[in-house]
Amino acid sequence: MTAFKHIFEKTLEAREILKGIAHRTRLDHSSTFSRLCDGDVYLKLENLQKTGSFKVRGAAYAMSQLSDKEKEAGVIAASAGNHAQGVAYAATRLGIKSTIVMPIFSPIAKIHATRAYGAKVILHGTTFDDALAFALETSEKTGATFLHPFNDVDVIAGQGTIGLEILDELPDVDVVAVPVGGGGISAGIAVTMKEQKPEVEVYGAEAATAASLQASLKAGRVTTVQGLDTVCDGIAVKTIGDKTFNIAKELLSGVATVKDLEVTRTLFLLLERAKIVVEPAGCVGLTAFQFKHIDIKDKVAVAVLSGGNIDMSFMARVVEKELYRLGRSVRLKGTIPDRVGTLNKVIGIVAESGVSVIELNQDRTDPDIAPNKTDLTMILEVPDESAVEKLLRLLDESGFSFHRFED
């Protein structure tokens, strides 16, 4: 029994209250990530939760604990997006007015979704911490109850219901990895796990450039970090909560940090192999497994995929960059005679090689190229490296000199 038994008891109550409000999300086994991580990997699909993230659990349970007078006054919250949607959805379900303060650079998809769930949205500041300060100030002025996204016992207890579900389905679990921003979900799951199965290892996972929990654990006290230059906007928090920190230092087995490019590679692999859409912040735990920041060799491991609210234009950029990195999209550049029929001949050679054309760009403005020549850049989709080599050979045999643009 841990010192956080009272939170565990609230979590048991939350499980009952959340029935019909939050989904009991699936726990899926992943053969792809099991192979990559040398362990037995399961994915807790909170990206398929109502509102697209785990946040609805804590928000709904916390609001269920409000008095009638507090419900009448309404609620206000600060969020980079997922807590916003969780609060908005739960408040509307309970007939409570909600106001959400979001940083001005929050993803457009999350802003629109929050409004669609019925909340009034105020955009303020460039970071979560800026939005938090403004929300607290507004709460004092209006009398609305402030709902903290992570540093609140009821919110922590609500998030802990994820741990109950994991143990129900997978009692032999050895390791659980949980994304950490403010620490609410990791704290809730750690309490749940340690109360029921103390030998389970629960790890936090943070973006390397927003590692407030790791910095705090090293310092032995709550510490603020600067920068927050990360694609993981959902966990870009400068300062861990004091309540979540106290739980983390007692119950977490460790905290791993992951780089942005590692995160986007995991995100791409989830999309292509598992057909699962996850936001960057939502897959940092799995990233820590994949890149061996957390050792799960020969262990039964769960990665909590905490959210799926990703901006589609960002997803498109991730896919494009990964296809280039993997060599499945290439850029070829060459100089060809600027006369009728030449471009058609080049395209014919490309077709003969079995390569697909994605984009063609001609540039006649380079002053170092003769007026009767033009630069041609081709963006191509290729099945493998041998197809590129075959195409370059065919072009060369036809008198056209092309090279990889990256070279």
Image (cartoon, rainbow, N blue to C red):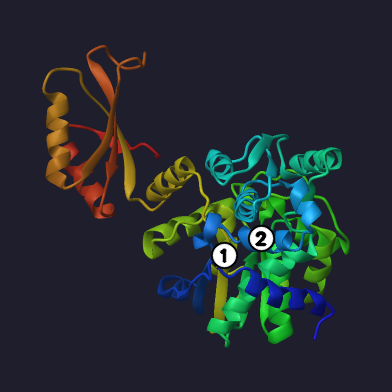
Q: Mark 1 and mark 2 in contact (Cβ < 8 Å)?
A: yes
User: Considering depth in this image, is 317 or 113 the residue closer to the camera?
Assistant: 113
Residue beneath disc 2: 60
Asked if one can make out residue 38 in the rendered structure from this viewpoint, the answer is no
Mark 2, Cα crowd under 10 Å, few <14 / some 14-19 / many 20+, is many
Q: Secondary structure at mark 1?
A: loop
Please state if 6 lies on the left or on the right of 337 as rendered. Answer: right
Which residue occupies 16% across, 32% down? 346
What's the amino acid at mark 2?
Answer: Ala
Mark 1, Cα crowd under 10 Å, few <14 / some 14-19 / many 20+, is many
What's the amino acid at mark 1?
Answer: Ala
- Looking at the image, residue 57 lies above or below residue 309: below
- Looking at the image, residue 237 lies above or below residue 299: above
Which residue occupies 68% across, 65% down? 185
Position in image of residue 349 (x %, y %) = 14, 38
Asked if one can make out residue 155 in the rendered structure from this viewpoint, the answer is yes
Give residue 370's quadrant in the image.
top left
Distance of label 2 from label 1 (alpha carbons): 8 Å
Give residue 373's quadrant in the image.
top left
Quadrant (top left/top right/bottom left/bottom right) for the C terminus: top left
User: Considering depth in this image, is 292 or 58 the residue closer to the camera?
Assistant: 58
Please state if 284 lies on the left or on the right of 199 as rendered. Answer: left
Residue beneath disc 1: 22
Q: Secondary structure at mark 2?
A: helix
